[in-house]
Image: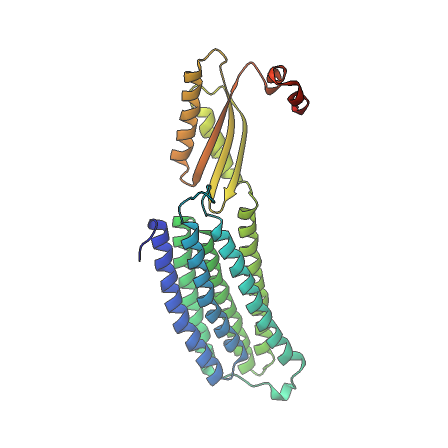
Amino acid sequence: MKYANEEEHIAMIVSLNSIVANLVLSLAKLAAGFMAQSAAMISDGVHSASDVFSTFVVMAGVKLSNKASDDEHQYGHERMECVAAIILACMLTLVALGIGYSGYEKIFHTDAADLVIPGQLALWAAVLSIVVKEGMFWYTRNAAQKINSGALMADAWHHRSDALSSIGSFVGILGARMGYPVLDPVASLIICLMILQAAYEVFKDAMDKMVDHSCDEETTKKLEELIERVPGVEHMDSLYTRMFGSRIYVDVEISVKDDLTLLQAHTIAETVHTAIEANFPLVKHCMVHVNPVSESIHDACPMLPPELRPKCK
């Protein structure tokens, strides 16, 4: 299989490993859940199975986001990762609601005498799940940070939510075996809430990147410090950033001395542009506007045609 770049290659390898691990783990948990008659473990197994489908969504998002720019998408396709993350959040929500409804039915519409005490096998399955899913979380998270992939990071948190739900399963199963069988379906409700929380975090992060949310304060401060250190920059007038998928667009205005030649002013602007893109790999594009230090935009208004002057502010 051909990959557009090393980032896509890493994402695909991690995703394929996740699919294999989730398939094996979900089958083991479902088998243990049915054999040990544990509603919590069956719910946990369904959650792991949903990870397989979500990883396919992640792979599609990463593949599409790495497509080269074309005439119809001149700014690239990076936001396709955000679309994949939103779909993943919706899938997580549906899984959570299904698990929550199942637990609700058992608690409020099943006689206490009919609640089954799960077998010991379910406990061991929960422990195995916690260890495996936490390991998958760190494995996927490290890869996501390395390539700055929002979709892959969403998949990592899906693994973490599965590890947390397995902890809930363990507590519920253990409580049921100690004489409180209602704790098994109660654990299903707790799992539901945990998955909903993970879905919300994934959805919020994706939406921030879809609506041109500015980059974080730390990155903005470092950009400002870098720009002001460039020789020839008298001061920075404005700085705007926006997230485009996992990449950053930067618009900056700088002031230079008004007695410089056009070539000298352009050289300073080009130095700022090059310095930003060289020091911030996530910056996909940087636009630098130059102002003369002794003038402001208001001084240009008299030079405009009369019909455009009212628009000067």
Q: Position of residue 227 (x, y in %)?
A: 46, 27
Give the total number of marks visible in the rendering: 0
Q: Position of residue 281 (x, y in %)?
A: 40, 39
Between residue 264 and residue 31, name the one nearer to us: 264
Q: Residue at x 31, y 55 (%)?
A: 2
* Extreme residue in the left direction: 1
Q: Residue at x 67, y 82 (%)?
A: 109
Q: Position of residue 206 (x, y in %)?
A: 53, 52
Q: Residue at x 55, y 75 (%)?
A: 172
Res. 29 image quadrant: bottom left
Q: Residue at x 49, y 19 (%)?
A: 234
Between residue 128 and residue 98, name the one nearer to us: 98
Res. 136 image quadrant: bottom left
215 left or right, relative to 60: right
133, above or below 201, in the image: below
6 left or right, relative to 180: left
Please name the colour scheme applied to the rendered image.
rainbow
